[in-house]
Amino acid sequence: MEGRPEDDSELFTRAQRGDTAAYEEIVRSYQQVAFRTAYMITGSAAEAEDAAQDGFMKAYRALDRFRPGAPPRPWLLRIVANEARNRVRSTQRRHGLELRLADGFRPGDAAPSPEAVSVAAEDTRRLLEVVNALGEEDRLVITSRYFLELSGDETAAALGIPEGTVKSRLSRALARLRTKLEEAARG
Amino acid sequence: MAELEQQLTSLGAELNWPPTPNLAPVVRSRITTPVVLRTPWYQSRWAVAAAALVIASAALVAYQPSREAIASWVNVHVFFQKVHVLPTPSPQPPGPLGKRLGLGGRTTLADAQKQVTWQITVPSYLGQPDEVYLQLPPAGPSKGEVTLVYSVRPGIPITGETGVTVLVTEARGAVDKNFFGKMLGPDTTVEPVTVAGHQGYWIAGAPHEFFFTDVDGNFRNETMRLATNTLLLDLGGTVVRIEGNLTKAQALQIAAS
């Protein structure tokens, strides 16, 4: 999905010199994680598309402030996520984000029996249901870290919070998730 | 990794995300398309015509034209309004700098950064500011306005209008929808400049009035004083003004640092 660091470094250097083809390549490399991050914040595919596009435009105009050799993902995600948050603020509207399982979802390819597959599927559905029912702060940090697989600094950039706060927020979110899963299991 | 965390990671792979749009060609096209909105006013026939209207309107209504209406005629992001006579600023109130110039409350750089959504730019050429002010709504723009004050710096004279050497003011302005502008008298010159890829304007000569529309479409202007030589830059939607008794070379050096 994303380029190797050495490729990125060269692409950023070329883009900083005004090579628009290099910047197009950078956008191609990061558009998925940028779009999904914006979608996580806005809850709307259309708003996420606009936010990601405008975020990449702003990043282009701010390229001179990008330090060559620095990891580009946190830098880009911070700009795109800010754009997404600004859109939510300016429209005073946030679409409720509800993550869904992919069509044709069948978990546990390695499960030993059809019954085990069925149990795994039910567990997965319940887990997603409980995540979707969490408060926004918990859901955002869990989505960032596990569903988007962002690192700590990338999550901090995407959520606009310090990295230390990510750790404490994630720890609290997981604790609440465990409690709610136990409640759901007890019925 | 704990079992729950493993389950969450596995769940992530099973999620149904909306298809990612192919943004790369669109972004490249936007980058390479000339931005008409940034055409300096004197290079646009429409703007020149509108500027003539502005002057006529200003004469008719005693230099109180509706700037928002004018902006919509011109439809340019950066808009310079030429008038024969500038409005007289209200007298500055007595008291400390922040109150005198209407900069808002005094704060620290770190605190100001916590309260605004953009990354505050501190020019390394000037170093750490001597004072920092934050103007919040309703007195300031909807996203706030930060002013960095540099009292004395070698080689830069103190400005009569402000009593300090350099003011760096930053606020959010919307790039796509809104505008910022300057009301210029006949003795003020304006020149487009580029600083590290960012377009801007160097406004020099006689003092001028500054105005702009913030991200929420609210019209803002300086009523406390007229501005001196100013380098105006749009850093990705953040309007940065570097103001002082500066030469153009000094201003560009500050902006590039």
Image (cartoon, coloured by chain):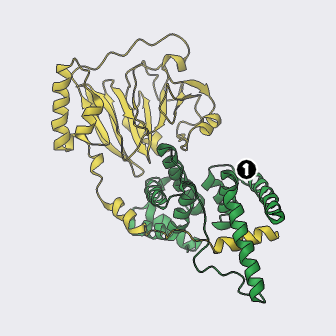
- Hey, which quadrant is residue B87 in on the image? top left
Q: Secondary structure at mark 1?
A: helix
Tell me which residue sits at (81%, 66%) in the image.
Answer: A185
Of residue A171 and residue B113, the one placed in the foreground of this image is A171
- Hey, which quadrant is residue A124 in on the image? bottom right
Chain in yellow colour: B
Q: Residues within 10 Å of mark 1 (few under 14, many from 20)?
A: few
Does residue B184 sit above or below A118 in this rendering?
Answer: above
Q: Where in the figure is residue B130, as x and y percent of width and height?
A: 59, 28
Q: Where in the figure is residue B209, as x and y percent of width and height?
A: 34, 25
Tell me which residue sits at (65%, 52%) in the image.
Answer: A136
Under mark 1, the amino acid is Thr
Report the residue marked by disc 1: A165
Tell me which residue sits at (72%, 62%) in the image.
Answer: A130
Name the quadrant of the N terminus of chain A: bottom right
Of residue B98 and residue B144, the one placed in the foreground of this image is B144
Q: Which chain is indicated by disc 1? A: A
Chain in green colour: A
Name the quadrant of the C terminus of chain A: bottom right
Q: Where in the figure is residue B27, as x and y percent of width and height?
A: 39, 62
